[in-house]
């Protein structure tokens, strides 16, 4: 009996630690951005700033955000290193532990995340294509840049382990 109580106690402690770690992954910067402590990246809290756009328009929108000529609903800061994420950076948000029909980690603090495709800055082959990630199922592929997909600005550099 004691053996089972000890096993149960260890399991509860471990699950509590796991929960605390996942809750500590994302920090709301209180300015419309979210810091990801796992990667070092900062994401726009609003994951749907401008709706779906063709790749070139998405790149221009993020450049305008970066220069202060455009904003995103809920963003109140003036940071100047916003950009389209690479496909690898977008992939850091994909989780097997997801909810709400999204592939984002449970308990994520993001708002307006869409069950659809999000552009990356990574060119595909041929050059008239770019990589995207589907936030409904985690599928990654490349497609024509004239197609309209969602835009999720990011800033910072990935922390390498």
Image (cartoon, rainbow, N blue to C red):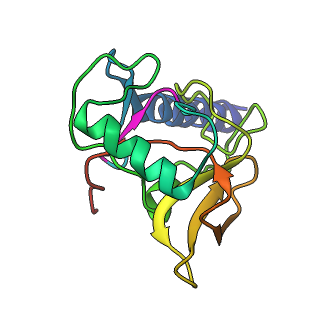
Span highlighted in magenta in the image: 40-46
* Residue closest to the eye, 41 or 128: 128
* Residue closest to the eye, 26 or 125: 125
Corner quadrant of residue 106 = top right
Corner quadrant of residue 104 = top right
Q: Is residue 160 above or below residue 16?
A: below
Q: How many marks?
A: 0
Q: Residue at x 62, y 26 (%)?
A: 112
* Residue closest to the eye, 114 or 3: 114
Magenta run includes residue 147: no
Residue 125 % position (x, y): 57, 84
Magenta run includes residue 44: yes
* Residue closest to the eye, 45 or 55: 55
Q: For residue 91, say whether it is visible.
A: no
Q: Is residue 27 above or below residue 37?
A: above
Query: As drawn, which residue projects farthest toward the bottom?
Result: 126
Residue 160 % position (x, y): 27, 62
Residue 134 % position (x, y): 69, 54
- 64 left or right of 128 in image: left
Q: Residue at x 43, y 25 (%)?
A: 72
Residue 17 % position (x, y): 48, 33
Q: Is residue 22 above or below residue 144?
A: above
Q: Residue at x 23, y 44 (%)?
A: 81
Q: Residue at x 72, y 46 (%)?
A: 116
Rendered-image quadrant of the C terminus: bottom left
């Amino acid at each position: 009996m004691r053996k089972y109580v000890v096993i149960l106690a260890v399991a509860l402690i471990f699950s509590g630690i796991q929960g605390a770690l996942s809750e500590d992954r994302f920090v709301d910067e209180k300015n419309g951005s979210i810091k990801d402590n796992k990667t070092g990246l900062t994401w726009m809290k609003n994951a749907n700033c401008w709706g779906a756009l063709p790749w070139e328009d998405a790149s221009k929108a993020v450049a305008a955000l970066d220069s202060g000529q455009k904003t995103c609903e809920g963003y109140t800061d003036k940071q100047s290193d916003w950009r389209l994420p690479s496909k690898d950076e977008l992939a850091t948000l994909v989780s097997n532990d997801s909810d709400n029909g999204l592939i984002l980690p449970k308990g994520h603090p993001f708002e307006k995340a869409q069950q659809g495709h999000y552009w990356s800055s990574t060119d595909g082959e041929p050059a008239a294509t770019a990589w995207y990630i589907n936030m409904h199922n985690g599928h990654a592929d490349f497609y024509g840049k004239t197609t309209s997909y969602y835009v999720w600005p990011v800033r910072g550099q990935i922390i390498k382990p």
